[in-house]
Image (cartoon, helix red, strand yellow):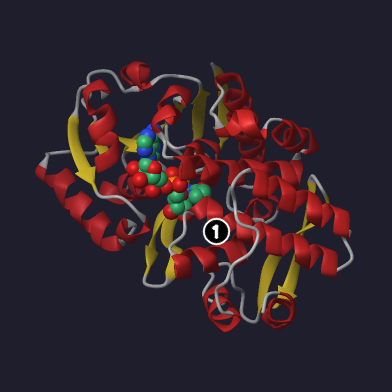
Amino acid sequence: MKSFTVNGLQKSSRILVGESLANAGAYLPEGIEPVIITDKNIQRLYGDAFPEGRVITIGTGEKIKTLATVETLLRELISLGCDRSGFVLGIGGGIVCDIVGFVASIFMRGIRFGFVSTSLLSQVDASVGGKNGVNLDAYKNMVGVFSQPDFVICDIDMLQTLPEAEISNGLAEIAKHGLIKDLSLLEFLEANTRKALALDTETIFRLVADSVAIKAAVVAADEREAGERRKLNFGHTIGHAIEKLEQAGHGRAVAAGMAAAVRFSEHKGYLDRKDVARVNTLLGNLNLPVQTDLPVPELIAAASRDKKKQGANLYFVFLEAIGQARVEKITYTELNTFMQTTMA
Ligand SMILES: NC(=O)c1ccc[n+]([C@@H]2O[C@H](COP(=O)([O-])OP(=O)(O)OC[C@H]3O[C@@H](n4cnc5c(N)ncnc54)[C@H](O)[C@@H]3O)[C@@H](O)[C@H]2O)c1
């Protein structure tokens, strides 16, 4: 097991890579039975292994990441008699973690919470870093807070039951970490795509641990996303637009968004054609898309509903080399022109 600390402004969080669901009880506050919030798949597969506690089960998919679900959960916490000394344990993927972190952070102005992170995507990204919240209408992650969990258990063994598409979704965010920050992680992923897709334990352990290390360092430097943390949004401007329109998995949408951002980086003269081909090959080998068939006007409309928009501008993440990101403030007009000329 490897343990990391994410140092937030108000609180630190422990990320335990390779720890097991079976040991979750050891990290809970003594004498307090947690309220466990999970989704129906995880309840069915792992409910018997949950620590002692009352369990609330929610549905699955982006469609339930709403304020309506938050309201339902807040009411359930009240009806279970949960008070300020209570503890909420989210067991699930990114959807469960995003919702549970938010619910716990606003219930009675905030009670303690932790996660057992069960999908590859949530282990390498969603459960780490303290961003949580829900969507509002067509706006993704529009309502939420920064709030660190007490701990995150990344149980590698639980990944064995993940559907194949969800493995690729997680690998997309790992590729992102390599592309923006860590050439050696990227090279390791390139050399081990088959082992990664087959969930070889040693390979996955390294990929998860390296990703968590990158995210922990970025969050420690810039928890509130005023600078460095923006780099983690690589591929997400166009990716979120695809995710909203296609209801594709987050990682698949981000992969197509990264491929577009890489082409934009070439268009700006930061990368050359062989870099673009290299990224496309890696994403293809991970069974991820490198383009989208969505109509460009719809994509542009969806991209303009991004919460990172600042008037007529947005921060766009380019690559200036493989393994190195740069953030630039560009106008929506520039983004639209790029998308119309290269994605239509
Ligand atoms: N807060 C952040 O910093 C952050 C970062 C990245 C992504 N996200 C969010 O995360 C969400 C996507 O997360 P996700 O990809 O984990 O989706 P998810 O939570 O929907 O999980 C994907 C599917 O896999 C199932 N699943 C999860 N773990 C499993 C397991 N061990 N075995 C079998 N099935 C399992 C789930 O039930 C679900 O059907 C998106 O809403 C995205 O916006 C948040």
Q: Is residue 148 left or right of residue 179?
A: left
Which residue lies at the image location 66% right of the left edge and 49% below the top edge?
284
Give the secondary structure at mark 1: helix
Find residue 136 and report its horizontal and vertical position in percent.
37, 68
Can residue 87 be spotted in the picture?
no
Which residue lies at the image location 56% right of the left edge and 76% below the top edge?
299
Query: Which image quarter holds the N terminus?
Result: top right
Query: Which image quarter holds the C terminus?
Result: bottom right
Which residue lies at the image location 26% right of the left edge and 24% below the top edge?
50
Find residue 252 and report its horizontal and vertical position in percent.
54, 54
Find residue 314 and report its horizontal and vertical position in percent.
66, 71
Find residue 190 and report its horizontal and vertical position in percent.
73, 37
Q: Is residue 256 left or right of residue 298?
A: right
Assign ligand 1 to one image quadrant: top left
Q: Is residue 256 left or right of residue 164?
A: right
Using a 10 Å C-alpha cutoff, classify the residue at mark 1 as few (fewer than 14 neighbours), some (14 to 19) or many (20 or more). Answer: many
Q: Quadrant of residue 114?
A: top left
Compared to 182, does 2 lie above or below? above
Which residue lies at the image location 62% right of the left edge and 60% below the top edge?
256
Report the amino acid beneath label 1: Ala
Q: Which residue is labeled 1 in the image?
A: 253
The one of 136 and 344 positioned closer to us in this rendering: 344
